[in-house]
Amino acid sequence: MELGKKYDELVAENERLRLQLEEANETIDAIRTGQIDALVVQGKKGHELYTLKTADQTYRVFIEKMTEGAVTLNQDGIILYSNSQFASMMHMPLSKVIGLSFLTFISAGSLEEFNALFARGWEEDCKGEIVLLSKGSTIVFQLSLTTLQLDEGFSLSIILTDLTAQKEAQRQLKLNNQQLEEINYALEVSNHDLQQFASVASHDLQEPLRKVNLYSNLLMSKHADEFSDSAKAYLRKIISSSDRMRTLIVDILSYSRLSETNNTFEPTDLKAMVTELLDDFEIMIEEKNASISVGDLPCVEVNPGQMRQVFQNIISNALKFTRAGVSPDIAIYGKTMAEHSINGHSRKQGPFCCICIKDNGIGFDEKYIDNVFTLFKRLHSKDKYEGSGIGLAITKKIIEKHNGEIIVRSKEGEGSEFIIVLPECQDRS
């Protein structure tokens, strides 16, 4: 009979505990979903009542849906409220989190920093990075602190953002930047070596080539009678090929030197430069019966030697690529503009200028436009038109070194127009 009473008592005790557990679970769920506005907590002075204003119910529902962690602390740092996300971050049941001191989760190395942040948070909204402990591992969080007014006073609301992914991205970015610096340094060394090689190679190549050309011309001039017609033809081919090779070597050297970072700019009267340059083309202009008009051109900050080469390359092509029976007609003119654009509007004074060089030569199909400024790319046979295929590549590189832009518009059988946009003054900052 005594044993029966004990059994009944145990059953009753189990039922009472089951009901308490259900009540606790319902309370926790109500807190999470914002269904209640009050919470009784066992404190130093017995049971203490904490209430949230009714308007805060929506706030709590919103906090529960967040991907960030969220906790509310009292003046002693006790967690009065936590969303499910924070409990998940700490790998703990939500019921175990509420009522704990928030210091439980702070790593030893961040205690001093958190205490300062905690004290400041009651005075003003603030943020800080703190390392938290979670199941034996450490996680860097950004804590955003703000005060929250409850019926019985103020509490401190903390939003916790996991910075793990951000820190890994920063680490990877730093690593990538270091690798880029190493690659850039290696490229600089390589470019320097290539420039040195190009300079030495071009000098060493020009000397034997000069002798090939010299002795070939001597044979043609002094011993022409001793050669058959076929031998003379072979010599002419040797001389022509050596001339082309010399031009190619000089152009390669010029192109390689453009890789140097140092560049000297000075105010230059482009019209005076073009006028002087045309004197060098005097014989070719007369032979081709060419007409060249030079309109207004601005005074801009350029590297005079390089910019002279730009005009020389484009004018030379205009005189070279002409239509049979049609005298070359070349127009060179410019305008100042307000914007860095090929199609920009002109104005009397502007920070940019546009230079146009238009001819009536053979032109080309614009489907080949990508090849025009490419190194060693030619649109026409080298047997019909001389050249190394480097001139316009050099031109484009010079314009880019002047922080400018160059395009070409053309139509087969009607001619071409080169359009260059340059800043009037170079940025030295």
Image (cartoon, rainbow, N blue to C red):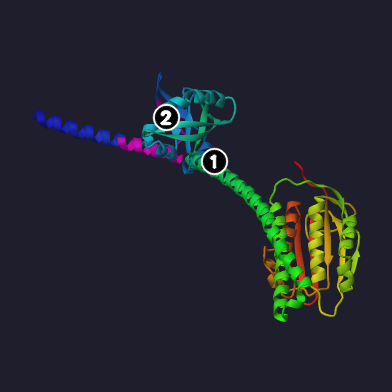
Residue 55, compared with residue 318, is above or below; it is above
Q: What stretch of residues is rendered in magenta? A: 21-41
Total tally of numbered discs in the picture? 2
Question: Dividing the picture into quarters, in which one does residue 79 lie?
Answer: top left
Decide: few, some or many residues near mark 1? Use Cα within 10 Å; few <14, some 14-19, many ≥20: few
**Within the magenta stretch, is there residue 3?**
no
Question: Label 1 is placed on what type of residue?
Answer: Lys
The residue identified by callout 1 is 174
The residue positioned 70% from the left and 56% from the top of the image is 253
Left or right: where does residue 308 sit relative to residue 39?
right
**Within the magenta stretch, is there residue 32?**
yes
User: Separation of disc 2 and disc 1 at Cα?
Assistant: 29 Å
Decide if residue 143 is in sight here: yes
Pick the quarter of the image with the N terminus.
top left
Q: Secondary structure at mark 1?
A: helix
Residue 421, compared with residue 16, is above or below; it is below
Ranked by sequence position, the earlier of labels 2 and 1 is 2
Q: Nearer the viewer, residue 104 or 423?
A: 423
Q: Which mark is residue 105?
A: 2
> Percent position (x, y) of residue 57?
50, 38
Q: Secondary structure at mark 2?
A: helix
